């Protein structure tokens, strides 16, 4: 622990030396404009919350539809058994086809919801980039104007 404490003042003094050297030589660090993290943007938070609510409601609706389809499937299977018994034939593959159709519907709905949410987030990201470029341009114009004023004096 003592070794770390002795290293801290050295690092700090070296940093101070670098700062004073860069100020003495007139070097300026480029200004880098960065947006706040996307997690802190309230619009992003609202969109994610809305997507989560939509996904939950979609899941509930999907469960209700699946329960209804299961009932329809059981009824269809019962009718198929009655028909096959009456015709002395084996049952058909309608149950499997209905299950596959249900699974494909659920996948399609989820893909659509995910794509819509991603598009909203992409729009916000593009707006943020555009705003950053505008801020950077304004700062650049202001610095050029300030330089011209200083040169004129």
Image: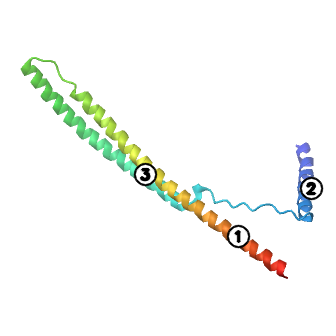
Left-right relation of 124 to 146: left
Crowdedness of circle 3 by 10 Å Cα count: few (<14), some, many (20+)?
A: few
Element carrying mark 1: helix
Q: Position of residue 53 (x, y in %)?
A: 41, 52
- The disc at residue 139 is 1
Question: Where in the figure is residue 104, as x and y percent of width and height?
Answer: 33, 37
Q: For the C terminus, give its image quadrant.
A: bottom right
Please report whichever mark, 2 or 3, sits nearer to the chain's N-terminal start. Answer: 2
Q: Is residue 96 above or below residue 134?
A: above
Which label was assigned to residue 152? none
Where residue 149 sits in the image (x, y, percent)?
79, 80
- For the residue pair 91 and 137, the one nearer the viewer reads as 137
Circle 3: element type = helix
Residue 80 on image: x %, y %: 14, 26
Q: Nearer the viewer, mark 3 or mark 1?
A: 1
Task: Please state which of residues 45 and 135 is positioned toward the viewer in this rendering.
Answer: 135
Mark 2 lies on a secondary structure that is helix
Q: Of the residues under marks 1 and 2, which one precedes in the sequence?
A: 2
What separation in Å lies between label 1 and label 2 (alpha carbons)? 32 Å
- Residue holding disc 2: 13
Name the residue at 90% across, 59% down.
16
Residue denoted by label 3: 116
| Spatial CA span between label 3 and label 1 | 35 Å
Residue in the foreground of this view, choosing between 51 and 9? 51
Q: CA distance from mark 2 to mark 3?
A: 53 Å
């Amino acid at each position: 622990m003592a070794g770390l404490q002795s290293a801290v003042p050295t690092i700090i003094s070296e940093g101070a030396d670098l700062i004073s050297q860069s100020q003495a030589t007139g070097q300026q660090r480029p200004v880098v404009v960065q947006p706040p993290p996307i997690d802190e943007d309230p619009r992003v938070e609202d969109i994610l919350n809305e997507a989560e609510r939509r996904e939950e409601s979609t899941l509930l609706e999907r469960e209700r539809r699946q329960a209804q389809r299961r009932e329809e499937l059981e009824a269809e299977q019962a009718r198929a058994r009655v028909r096959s018994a009456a015709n002395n034939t084996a049952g058909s593959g309608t149950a499997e086809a209905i299950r596959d159709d249900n699974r494909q519907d659920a996948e399609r709905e989820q893909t659509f919801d995910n794509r819509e949410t991603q598009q909203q987030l992409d729009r916000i990201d593009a707006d943020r980039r555009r705003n950053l470029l505008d801020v950077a341009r304004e700062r650049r114009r202001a610095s050029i104007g300030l330089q011209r004023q200083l040169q004129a004096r």
